[in-house]
């Protein structure tokens, strides 16, 4: 046993001595304590500076110990005073080492030690009396009752009923320490919350200055295994209840992050209920004003933006971009730019980069200029691979302007053949609108028919009788639709079609019912409803997964193409006219996106060229070979671009464009441009010498078996060493956002609308909240409470509100 000597003042240890034991003291082994210097020995421990210790009373009688309680010293000690001012303690219990240390951490050494010998015993508290004394001035007695039994005083916690020493010579430090770890105490300090977080991370609970093993807490036996003083616990104003100090800045940022993550309104900090809740929870927390929490959110946004910038800067692959327009209160509009890419771990990422307010009278030039400014602000114009917009003729000019700017600096591969992408879900919505418009009269009759049937109980019973007479075995319930959500209109039509015979009989037996559709109208409703069913299935594929890869779209779009061809041949003039109208929009989409759809499908190892050959033979018939050859030539050209293009060359060209602005290149860049032709020549001559490329080897391999659990990104991650160049191309192509619409808004007939709380904020704050929430979303999803506490939407789904009522 080693001892270090330090001078004490009034029984207070000035510096933590180094104390060493080997596990527990065996029976009859002697532990020596120096009374003059107040030094203590304990197993593998360090004591907190200025921690008081009480000596044990020598006026103790032997006692028989059974079922010892951890809060009392349940062991027999022989105390002998020597002339060298030391106390010799002889333990007679097997657990003397740990229990002695536990006792020492909760008691303080007196200024004068009592000499003699005796034993410590458990205190009996039966027939006790609660002591009310004006001398108990410490605030700690607000949480303890002092009970006296004979000459012994016990402090009983009012929360957990644990019993600690209540002697006037014991002080109150051990009572304060207990309050910190008392689980049943109603008013927790911030320091306890921090200690709880550390417990989850390290598997141990930090109580003030002492660390206890978690398993020992469960057994209600507190054996100190490692006492240490940590300076970090009191940095930046973080402290325990004894110091009555909390980390104000950290608490403010926790509040701001909560508001960002969950989409709460900033004005919640001014709500009376919130102020009362915070004050009752932690009176020491300084309430934050609206301007204060807004500034904290902006600071968090700037930090998260820097992280996002570093991620995009280190990204080796290309980035695709999606653009959407959001409506706010009044005529205000916001442009939302979203990046989509596959990272180094072959995970598909989708991040909002900008949420910029736009002038309602903005022109195509203004919009394209805003997009280019955002691209250069993030320094990703040199990395842009494709851009996805809605299917609108006005977007054609915007796309052309941006593509021309990027092509001048040779940032786009294959002259931007895969750059112009249109949203597939938007195409489906446009065709659905055409279909519902053509069926509007029939839909109105069906809606009024259902409303009439549900107008009274008598009509409902009569309609049920008609259904029985017509032998209708409908499994669906009649329900009214929400005109702003077209999938609900389809469900209404689907249910009504099952009861069409019942509606016809009801019209014959009920003169008040006059809005029943005719047989021809029922047939048209059935034809269009079947097509709407296909649209719903396709939309679920587009938006069903969180971030769908580009390979899943080709078969779905081809099925729509084939259905449109059949619909154009309908004998019903209304149906055929509708089909021609929808097909004209589809052809515009197919002209721009068919190449990207086909290339993405070819990069699926389950299909490769076979899927293209299968669908093209149905779509083009005898001309299929010509179109298949065009796809084959394009994918080889795209592969060659990936094989010879260097990211450093693109970087140099981008810098020259941004700095010079005139497109003039230095002599070194002119030389490099001339050598690009040599690179192509070298690549072509190598192919003529029967050197197989990654693409050739990939296409020659047999198809991968189709199964439900297949993940194309995992497949390419595994096969990257085998196809290094082709895998780089697959990463860029599969990351194209062929659809920009999430499932929750995929069936919405209206645009996305920013909620009222966000609309009332400044444009800079709105961008900070929207972008920061998106960047921090992974943190929220990883938390254990995400399944039951999701984010509040930043946009209002107008389709859920009809005439001021929620449908």
Image (cartoon, rainbow, N blue to C red):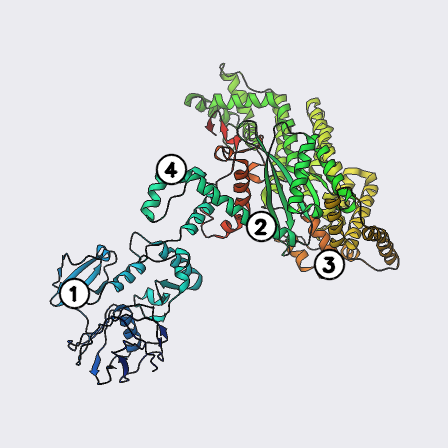
Which of the two discs, 4 and 2, labels the residue nearer the N terminus? 4
| Marks 3/1: CA–CA distance | 78 Å
| Marks 4/2: CA–CA distance | 32 Å
Q: Which residue is mark 3?
A: 724
Q: Are marks 3 and 4 in contact (CB under 8 Å)?
A: no
| Marks 2/3: CA–CA distance | 31 Å
Which of the two discs, 1 and 4, labels the residue nearer the N terminus? 1
Determine crowd level at label 4: few under 14, some 14-19, many 20+ residues with C-alpha closer than 10 A.
few
Relative to the observer, which residue lies in front, 619 or 108?
Answer: 108
Viewer-side label of 3, 1: 1
Instruction: Give residue 40's quadrant in the image.
Output: bottom left
SS label for mark 1: strand
Which of the two discs, 3 and 1, labels the residue nearer the N terminus? 1
Whether residue 82 is situated above or below residue 350 in the rendered picture:
below
Viewer-side label of 3, 4: 4
Q: Which residue is mark 1?
A: 153
Q: Quadrant of the N terminus?
A: bottom left
Whether residue 227 is situated above or below residue 462 in the rendered picture:
below
Q: Which residue is mark 2?
A: 306
Residue visible at 65% across and 27% down in the picture? 434
Whether residue 451 is situated above or below residue 607 in the rendered picture:
above
Viewer-side label of 4, 2: 2
| Marks 3/4: CA–CA distance | 57 Å
Which of the two discs, 2 and 3, labels the residue nearer the N terminus? 2
Relative to the observer, which residue lies in front, 573 or 692?
Answer: 692
């Amino acid at each position: 046993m080693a001892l270090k000597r330090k001078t004490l003042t009034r029984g207070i240890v000035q510096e933590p001595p180094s104390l060493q034991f080997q596990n527990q003291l065996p029976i009859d082994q002697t532990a020596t304590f120096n009374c003059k210097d107040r030094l203590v020995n304990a197993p593998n421990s360090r004591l907190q500076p200025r921690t008081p210790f009480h000596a044990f009373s020598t006026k103790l009688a032997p006692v028989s110990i059974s079922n010892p309680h951890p809060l009392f010293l349940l062991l027999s000690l022989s105390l002998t005073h020597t002339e060298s001012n030391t106390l010799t303690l002889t333990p007679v219990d097997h657990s003397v080492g740990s229990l002695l240390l536990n006792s020492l951490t909760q008691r303080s050494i007196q200024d004068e030690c009592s000499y003699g010998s005796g034993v410590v015993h458990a205190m009996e508290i039966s027939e006790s009396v609660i002591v009310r004394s004006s001398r108990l001035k410490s605030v700690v007695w607000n949480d303890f009752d002092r009970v006296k039994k004979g000459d012994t005083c016990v402090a009983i916690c009012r929360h957990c009923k644990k019993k600690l020493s209540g002697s006037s010579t014991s002080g109150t430090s051990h009572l304060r320490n207990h309050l910190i770890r008392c689980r049943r105490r109603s008013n927790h300090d911030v320091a306890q919350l921090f200690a709880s977080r550390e417990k989850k991370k390290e598997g141990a609970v930090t109580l003030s200055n002492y660390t206890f093993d978690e398993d020992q807490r469960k057994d209600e036996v507190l054996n100190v295994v490692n006492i240490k003083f940590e300076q970090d616990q009191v940095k930046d104003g973080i402290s325990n209840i004894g110091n009555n100090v909390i980390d104000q800045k950290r608490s403010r940022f926790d509040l701001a992050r909560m508001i960002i993550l969950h989409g709460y309104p900033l004005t919640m900090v001014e709500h009376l209920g919130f102020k009362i809740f915070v004050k009752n929870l932690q009176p020491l927390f300084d309430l934050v004003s609206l301007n204060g929490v807004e500034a904290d959110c902006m600071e968090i946004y700037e930090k998260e933006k820097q992280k996002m910038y570093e991620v995009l800067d280190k990204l080796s692959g290309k980035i695709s971009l999606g653009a959407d327009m959001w409506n706010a209160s009044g005529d205000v509009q916001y442009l939302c730019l979203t990046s989509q890419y596959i990272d180094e771990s072959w995970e598909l990422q989708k991040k909002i980069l900008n949420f910029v307010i736009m002038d309602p009278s903005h022109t195509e030039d203004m919009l394209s200029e805003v997009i280019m400014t955002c691209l250069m602000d993030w320094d990703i114009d040199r990395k842009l691979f494709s851009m996805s917009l809605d299917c609108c003729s006005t977007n054609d000019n915007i796309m052309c302007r941006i593509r021309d700017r990027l092509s001048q600096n040779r940032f786009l591969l294959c002259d931007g053949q895969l750059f112009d992408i249109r949203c597939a879900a938007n195409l489906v919505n446009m065709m659905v609108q055409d279909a519902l418009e053509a069926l509007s009269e029939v839909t109105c009759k069906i809606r009024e028919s259902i409303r009439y049937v549900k107008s009274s109980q008598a009509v409902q019973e009569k309609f049920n009788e008609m259904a029985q007479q017509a032998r209708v075995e409908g499994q669906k319930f009649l329900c009214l639709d929400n005109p702003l959500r077209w999938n609900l209109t389809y469900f209404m039509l689907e249910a009504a079609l099952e009861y069409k015979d019942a509606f016809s009989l009801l019209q014959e037996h009920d003169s008040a019912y006059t809005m029943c559709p005719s047989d021809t109208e029922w047939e048209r409703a059935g034809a269009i409803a079947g097509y709407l069913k296909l649209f719903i299935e396709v939309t679920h594929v587009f938006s069903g997964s969180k971030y769908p890869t580009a390979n899943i779209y080709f078969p779905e779009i081809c099925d729509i193409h084939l259905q449109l061809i059949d619909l154009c041949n309908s004998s019903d003039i209304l149906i055929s006219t509708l089909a021609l109208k929808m097909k004209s929009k589809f052809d515009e989409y197919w002209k721009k996106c068919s190449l990207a759809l086909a290339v993405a499908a070819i990069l699926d190892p389950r299909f490769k060229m076979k899927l293209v050959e299968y669908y093209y033979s149905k779509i083009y018939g005898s001309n299929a070979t010509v179109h298949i050859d065009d796809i084959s030539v394009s994918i080889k050209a795209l592969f060659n671009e990936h094989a010879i293009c260097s990211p450093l060359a693109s970087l140099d060209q981008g810098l020259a464009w941004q700095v010079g602005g005139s497109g003039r290149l230095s002599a070194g860049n002119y030389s490099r441009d001339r050598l690009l032709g040599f690179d192509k020549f070298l690549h072509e001559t190598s192919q003529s010498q029967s050197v197989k490329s990654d693409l050739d080897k990939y296409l020659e391999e047999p198809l991968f078996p189709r199964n439900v659990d297949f993940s194309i990104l995992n497949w390419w991650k595994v096969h990257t060493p085998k196809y290094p160049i082709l895998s780089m191309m697959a990463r860029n192509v599969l990351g194209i956002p062929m659809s920009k619409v999430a499932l929750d808004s995929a069936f919405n007939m209206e645009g996305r609308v920013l909620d009222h709380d966000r609309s009332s904020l400044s444009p800079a704050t709105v961008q900070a909240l929207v972008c920061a929430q998106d960047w921090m979303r992974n943190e929220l999803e990883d938390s254990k409470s995400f399944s039951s506490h999701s984010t509040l939407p930043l946009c209002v789904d107008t389709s859920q509100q009809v005439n001021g009522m929620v449908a």
